Amino acid sequence: NAGVTQTPKFQVLKTGQSMTLQCAQDMNHEYMSWYRQDPGMGLRLIHYSVGAGITDQGEVPNGYNVSRSTTEDFPLRLLSAAPSQTSVYFCASNDRGITTDTQYFGPGTRLTVL
Amino acid sequence: EDKVVQSPLSLVVHEGDTVTLNCSYEVTNFRSLLWYKQEKKAPTFLFMLTSSGIEKKSGRLSSILDKKELFSILNITATQTGDSAIYLCAVETSGNTGKLIFGQGTTLQVKP
């Protein structure tokens, strides 16, 4: 199992550009989420999905879109990048077994918007 | 509004010390509380707590949840420099969503 993979690892954008952060998991998890992490603010939920075809907003959804056409993939789209979106982005998927409720995180994407 | 608050935000100790990290929460429909350790990369899972008063232990780390007073603590005994990290507390609310609300994190530095 590769676990949760994210691409790219680093990205620099100019204000106004758009891009898609990729996230994939091979554990057949139903639940997937996107978080952003900024200094002193922990992780904040952007969007999440409880299964293919179902997505919902988290705490900070503005400026981001998601879709979940397959169980494996959960891409995050920045429509028009802004400097306030400079952050580290983590994708996660959930193992919702009977005795565990572990959230597996991808390695992160460090995004800088100039 | 659901929120999770951790304290202290940062802590510096020396090897061998014992530390206690705090996490308090105000959420609707509490489901579980989770602790993570984050070094340079992604957070790694430590504990999940769902029931009050039951201590979870893993080596020198232990954690307990008080659902009446709405808080959890993470204890680390005999700290080592390898314990230096950000410790994150998160609460899962409602059912079957998988989404977590995180606290700000506590940055722990253990000096030799």
Image (cartoon, coloured by chain):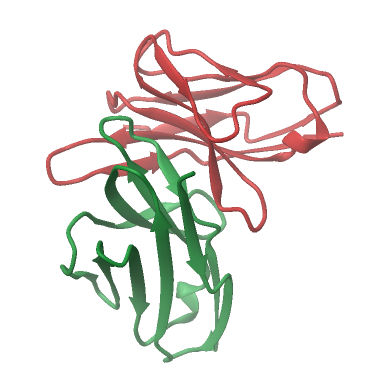
Instruction: Give the residue furthest to the left.
Output: A98
> Residue A15 at x, y = what percent?
86, 25
Decide if residue B12 is on the left or right side of residue B76: right
Identify the colour of chain A in the image: red
Q: Nearer the viewer, residue A32 or B83?
A: A32
For the C terminus of chain A, give its image quadrant.
top right
x and y percent of residue A86 in the render? Answer: 74, 38
Q: Residue at x 32, y 35 (%)?
A: A94
Q: Is residue B38 left or right of residue A38?
A: left
B2 sits left or right of A84 in the view: left
Q: Quadrant of residue A49?
A: top left
Chain letter, colour green in render: B
Residue A56: image location, x then y, percent: 45, 21
Name the side, left or right, on which A56 lies relative to B70.
Answer: right
- Up the image or down, A4 lies above or below B103; here it is above
Q: Residue at x 13, y 46 (%)?
A: A99
Image quadrant assignment for residue A14 = top right
Residue B84, above or below A88: below
Q: Quadrant of the N terminus of chain A?
A: top left
Closest to the observer, B58 or A54: A54
Q: Position of residue A48 (x, y in %)?
A: 44, 27
Residue at (15, 67) in percent of width and height = B54
Seen from the viewer's position, the closer of residues A51 and A8 is A51
